[in-house]
Image: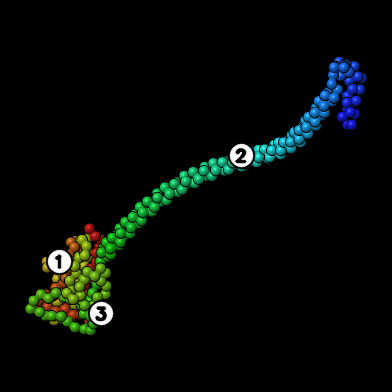
Amino acid sequence: MKIKTMAVLLLVLLLCAGSSIAQDLLSPSVDIIAELEKLKHMDGRIQKLEETLTKVLSENEALKTEVRDSQNKLETVQKESEALKTEVRDSQNKLETVQKESEALKTFVQDSQSKLESLQKESEALKTLVQDSQNKLESLQKENEGKKVAFSAGLLASGTGKIGPFSYDKTLEYKKVFSNVGNAYDSNTGIFTAPVKGVYYFRFYGHGHGGTTMAITLLKNGQSQCSVHSARPASSSNASNGVVLTLEIGDKINTQLWRNTWVYDDPASYTSFSGFLIFPL
């Protein structure tokens, strides 16, 4: 019924159109049933084509949606890529800055090390200079200490008494030491030994009682230099003498009581022996 209806409609359309196809269909030689069968098959194909077209259109829409999603994802990836590129550039810039700062720091450290080494060398040189100066100072102090020479001593350490007479010349030993700077005088022997070469001054005193003879000589290395003498005075007498001598290191100075003479002393130290370095040579 459906086919007949479609056939009728098709004939009406063809007649209205006045086409040559209508004329062919109305022609007695045309098999209407066969043509209707063809139309039926054609209708099925059209339906399949419509279904296929609908499916293709649906797939096309899905593909468009997928393409849009892919484009969106691509845009997102591109944006992330640009952001990453920017981040990479920033990181590279920071790295370059850090590298420059590192190079500058290395240069600074090297300069500092060079300065430190220079300061250490200067410090060592300064230490050496200070040590040398200290050594020179100590040497000068020792030398100056050696140049500080002076002594003074009385004949008797204590009490009152006389020495002599002897049958030989007697070296006097002055026991009461007032000062002995440089320790050049030996109270055990009565001998002064020059510690440095220089010009010295020596002075000695002798005291004699009435009726006795007192005579004392100052000697340098056993050689007479000057003397005092008092021959049997009516009462007590006192005599002194002094001399400036140039001495070498080790020269010896002492006083000697002449044989058969006397010398007196008491707590007032009338009989004494003194000397000191005027200046070194």
10 Å crowding of disc 1: few (<14), some (14-19), many (20+)? some
Q: CA distance from mark 1 to mark 2?
A: 107 Å
- Tell me the quadrant of the picture where the N terminus can be found: top right
**Which residue is the site of mark 2?**
85
10 Å crowding of disc 3: few (<14), some (14-19), many (20+)? few
Kind of residue at disc 1: Lys
Res. 158 visible in picture = yes
As drawn, is 264 to the left or to the right of 93? left
Above or below residue 187? Residue 3 is: above
Q: Earlier in the sequence, mark 3 or mark 1?
A: 1
**Which quadrant holds residue 58?**
top right
As drawn, is 3 to the left or to the right of 49? right
As drawn, is 231 to the left or to the right of 48? left
The residue that appears at 46% across and 48% down in the rendered structure is 109
Q: Earlier in the sequence, mark 1 or mark 2?
A: 2
Q: CA distance from mark 3 to mark 1?
A: 27 Å
Name the spot of residue 6 as percent of width and height, x first: 88, 28
**Which residue is the site of mark 1?**
220
As drawn, is 45 to the left or to the right of 249? right
Given this view, does label 3 or label 2 mark the residue nearer the observer? 2
Of helix, strand and loop, which one carries label 1? strand
Given this view, does label 3 or label 1 mark the residue nearer the observer? 1
**Which residue is the site of mark 3?**
268
Kind of residue at disc 3: Ala
Q: Earlier in the sequence, mark 3 or mark 2?
A: 2
Above or below residue 178? Residue 148 is: above
Above or below residue 105? Residue 162 is: below
Name the spot of residue 48 as percent of width and height, x first: 78, 32
